[in-house]
Amino acid sequence: MSEHQSQPRESKQLLHLVFGGELQAIGGTTFRDPSQLDVVGVFPDYASAERAWRAKAQQTVDSAMTRYFIVHLHRFLDPS
C-alpha cells in the first residue's frame, strides 16, 4: 500500500454563509440598510449553517421585517 493510499481522503469542503438583517418589504430580499447586516458566520457544511440560521431566526421571530439567509458559498467558489 502506498503512502497516498493509507491517508484518509479529505471530504470536499462545502462552505455556507449565514447572514441577515431588516428587509425593506416582507417577502422581499432587499435590505433596509446593508451596512447593518448581521453576518453570523461561515460554516463548513449545510447542517451547521442551518443550526445557526435556525437559532438566529428564532431570536428574531418577533421582528417580521428581519430575515436570515443561508448562502451556498461552495457554489460560487466551484460552480461545477
Image: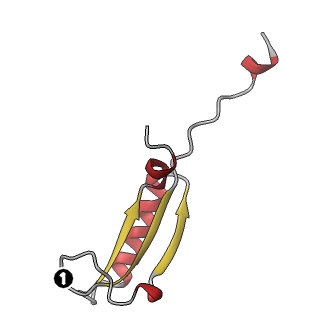
Q: Residue at x 28, y 79 (%)?
A: 30
Residue 62 position within the rendered picture, expressed as x and y whole percent measured from the top left: 27, 89
- In the picture shown, does residue 29 fall above or below 60? above
Residue 79 position within the rendered picture, expressed as x and y whole percent measured from the top left: 44, 43
- In the picture shown, does residue 60 fall above or below 48? below
Secondary structure category for the residue under label 1? loop
> Exactly how many numbered labels are in the figure?
1
Q: Residue at x 78, y 9 (%)?
A: 1
Q: Quadrant of the C terminus?
A: top left
Question: Which amino acid is tagged 1?
Answer: Ile
The residue under label 1 is 26
- In the picture shown, does residue 25 fall above or below 10? below
Q: Is residue 35 left or right of residue 23?
A: right
Identify the residue at the far right of this view. 3
Q: Nearer the viewer, residue 55 or 34?
A: 34
Residue 40 position within the rendered picture, expressed as x and y whole percent measured from the top left: 50, 74
User: Badge 1 local density, few (<14 within 10 Å), some, or many (20+)?
Assistant: few
Q: Nearer the viewer, residue 48 or 78?
A: 78
Q: Nearer the viewer, residue 47 or 77?
A: 77
